[in-house]
Image (spheres, rainbow, N blue to C red):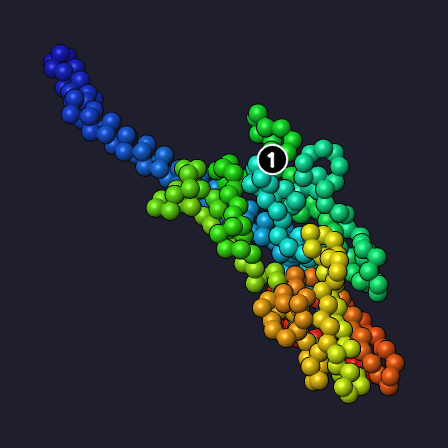
Amino acid sequence: MNFKNKKRLSNSIGFTLLELVVVLAILGFLTAMTSRIFTNEDDQRRFDETRAQMQEIKKAILGGEGAYANGQRQFAGYVADMGGLPALDAVTNQPEGLWTDDLDSDGTPDLLGWVYNPLPNPPDSMVWMGWRGPYVGTPALRSGEVSGQEKLRDGWGNPLVFDDTTTPGDLIITSPGANGVINAVDTGFDKDIAMIIKQTEYMAPVAGRVRNFDASTEANVTVTIYFPVSGIEPNPDHTISGVPVDGYFRFERGAAGVGTNGTRDIPAGVRHIFVSGIVSGVSVQRAVVFTVEPTGNWLGDINLQ
């Protein structure tokens, strides 16, 4: 009786080979599913970090949105201070001007610091311009890198790829995704992640009308606009010499009939226009400080009387 009971007990608590195989298969399946879930969650987190990093870079270049002072929108990004996109380093292909003014790492600034009217162009430009970064935090150096080799990276640690040549005036920022390889046919988290900063987001036309100058003296009217190019005031300044009899003027790419220096858009930020004309036989001057926004900018009437 005791032997039979022990045999029955042994049969009830034991496992057959088939049962063990089934259990191991289930455990393997659960392990694989758990690993896949954790991997997807990790990739999603890195994807979100990449998108957030790109948005911060865009904000650093274009300036924050929604900030106003004295009724005018304020821009505090690279474009507002420097007048255009940061140049890409010839070796690292990175926009180093976003975090340093010493582009060649020799200890001497290569970008002019933020100053008031850096060139002695009369009249006073009445605006500040020049580098006042850093606009983003300095990227950490990786093992084997030396100063000057810093790179902005995505959530997976891959260097972000910057391209300002495909469409002149635009900047394309690309992450190669989880696999670290730029490939247009990738799928899932391996798919490239791209963001484009278009020229129309930081450059815009400016127009207005000069009023109340002497009839038949429109050729004597001059309209000068002050803004930075690579952080300094261009010399000669962008001036429209002569306006139509109705006084209209515009600074716009490809604009016709407004003078050579009027044929370009103006970078977003606080800018100044200086207008002069003849009133009652006397030269009169007016100054207007305004904010260029990345849309159409109409200044309205500038009265000389």
Q: Mark 1: few, some, or many residues within 10 Å (few <14, many ≥20)?
A: some
Which quadrant of the figure has residue 169? bottom right
The residue lying toward the viewer, choosing from 132 and 217, is 217
Q: Is residue 137 visible?
A: no
Q: Residue 220 location in percent, x, y?
A: 78, 77
Which quadrant of the figure has residue 216? bottom right
Q: Residue 197 location in percent, x, y?
A: 54, 55
The residue lying toward the viewer, choosing from 267 and 212, is 212
The residue lying toward the viewer, choosing from 178 and 93, is 93
Identify whether 174 is placed above or below 180. Answer: below
- For the point 65% across and 45% down, the residue is 98
- For the point 83% across and 81% down, the residue is 278
Q: Is residue 125 left or right of residue 189?
A: right
Residue annotated with mark 1 = 150
Count of all numbered marks drawn on residues in the image: 1
Q: What element carries label 1?
A: loop
Q: Residue 34 location in percent, x, y?
A: 35, 36
